[in-house]
Image: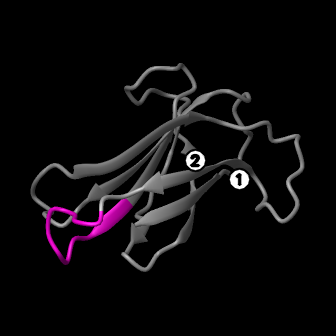
Amino acid sequence: MDLTVSVVTRGPAPAPGTPLRVEVRDTTTQDAAAVVLARVDTTTEDPDVAVPGAPAGLLATVQVEVPDAPATPAADLTVFAHVSTNGGEEVTAGDLLTVQSYPATADTAELQVEVVRIG
């Protein structure tokens, strides 16, 4: 499954080149840690560069290739995004994260996710 994820924010955008991670996780089992099926590490784009037809607040558009055989046939897949303003892998104050669930299915080709700054 190929998935195009547009990462957007309503607040101030981080500097261009800020590390961005997009993951597709198998969240089928609610009482266990989610299994990461696909991960893309990239950086945010320059928000001042106008892209025709791009959504407002676009930080990046990422192509994620998800394996065709997730852990379970009826897996619940969820997209997660993390913009690390300090460049580290751990979530820290000031980072931008998805704070709601963005489900994906085998039929999902494009998905827009919003990240918000955490305190």
Q: Residue furthest left?
A: 31
Residue 72: name its quadrant.
Answer: bottom left
User: Which sits in the foreground, 73 or 87?
Assistant: 73
Q: Secondary structure at mark 1?
A: loop
Q: Are marks 1 and 2 in contact (CB under 8 Å)?
A: yes
- The percent coordinates of residue 58 (x first, y second) are 72, 51
What kind of secondary structure does the magenta stretch mostly adopt?
A: loop
Which mark, residue 50?
Answer: none
Residue topped by disc 2: 116
- The percent coordinates of residue 113 (x first, y second) are 55, 59
Q: Earlier in the sequence, mark 1 or mark 2?
A: 1
x 71%, y 46%: residue: 11
The answer to whether residue 119 is seen in the rendering is no
- Colouring rule applied to residues: one colour
What number of labels is visible? 2
* Magenta-tinted stretch: 68-78
Q: Amino acid at mark 1?
A: Arg
x 47%, y 75%: residue: 108
User: Which sits in the foreground, 16 or 70?
Assistant: 70
Residue 106: name its quadrant.
Answer: bottom left
Quadrant of the image containing the N terminus? bottom left
Measured in 3D between alpha carbons, the distance from the residue under mark 1 to the one under mark 2, in whole angstroms, is 7 Å
Which mark, residue 10?
Answer: 1
x 51%, y 39%: residue: 118
| Residue 33 in magenta stretch | no
Q: Amino acid at mark 2?
A: Val
In the depicted structure, whether residue 89 falls above or below residue 57: above
The answer to whether residue 39 is seen in the rendering is yes
- The percent coordinates of residue 95 (x first, y second) are 53, 33
Looking at the image, residue 6 sits to the left or right of residue 10; the answer is left
In the depicted structure, whether residue 50 falls above or below residue 117: below
Looking at the image, residue 50 sits to the left or right of residue 80; the answer is right
